[in-house]
Image: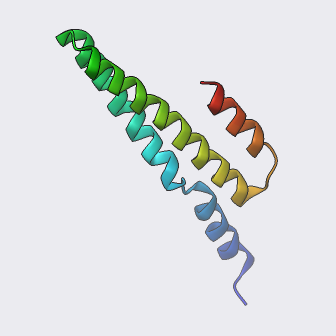
Amino acid sequence: MPSSSRFLRATKRKASVMDKFRIEGNTDRIKGAVKVWAGRILGSDRLRAEGQADKAKGHIKQAAGKAADMGRRGMAGASRTIRKAIRH
């Protein structure tokens, strides 16, 4: 039987791990912001629209990741997080 302090350390490590969707969402949001910026600089409406779509996709992925993280900790607030992301 593991000691209680070792168990608590392992539990804390697991709680701090972010879901892969949160990481991918942040990446998509940053990529989208760069595309929007480049589209403005270059005067490209297509690039700006792609950037806005990437940012929206990133918001949705990030919300899914937050919901998955909450699911690991408990369901309290998961539906509120999803609703909040959809409004963006």
Q: Residue furthest left?
A: 42
Picture mark count: 0
What percent of the width, then of the height, locates residue 8? Answer: 69, 68
Q: Residue furthest bottom?
A: 1
Q: Which quadrant is home to the C terminus? A: top right
What percent of the width, then of the height, locates residue 32? Answer: 36, 28
29 with respect to 78 (left or right): left
**Residue nearer the viewer, 5 or 56:** 56
Which residue shows up at 73% across the image and 57% down it?
73
What percent of the width, then of the height, locates residue 11? Answer: 66, 67
**Residue nearer the viewer, 81 or 17:** 81
23 with respect to 44 (left or right): right
What percent of the width, then of the height, locates residue 70? Answer: 70, 51
62 with respect to 41 (left or right): right
Displayed quadrant of residue 30: top left
Displayed quadrant of residue 41: top left
20 with respect to 27 (left or right): right
Q: Residue furthest front?
A: 46
Q: Which quadrant is home to the N terminus? A: bottom right
- Relative vertical location of residue 70 with respect to residue 14 in this rendering, above or below: above
- Relative vertical location of residue 30 with respect to residue 5 in this rendering, above or below: above
- Relative vertical location of residue 50 with respect to residue 6 in this rendering, above or below: above
The colour scheme used to paint the residues is rainbow
Which residue shows up at 33% across the image and 33% down it?
31
Which residue shows up at 48% across the image and 30% down it?
56
Which residue shows up at 35% across the image and 25% down it?
51
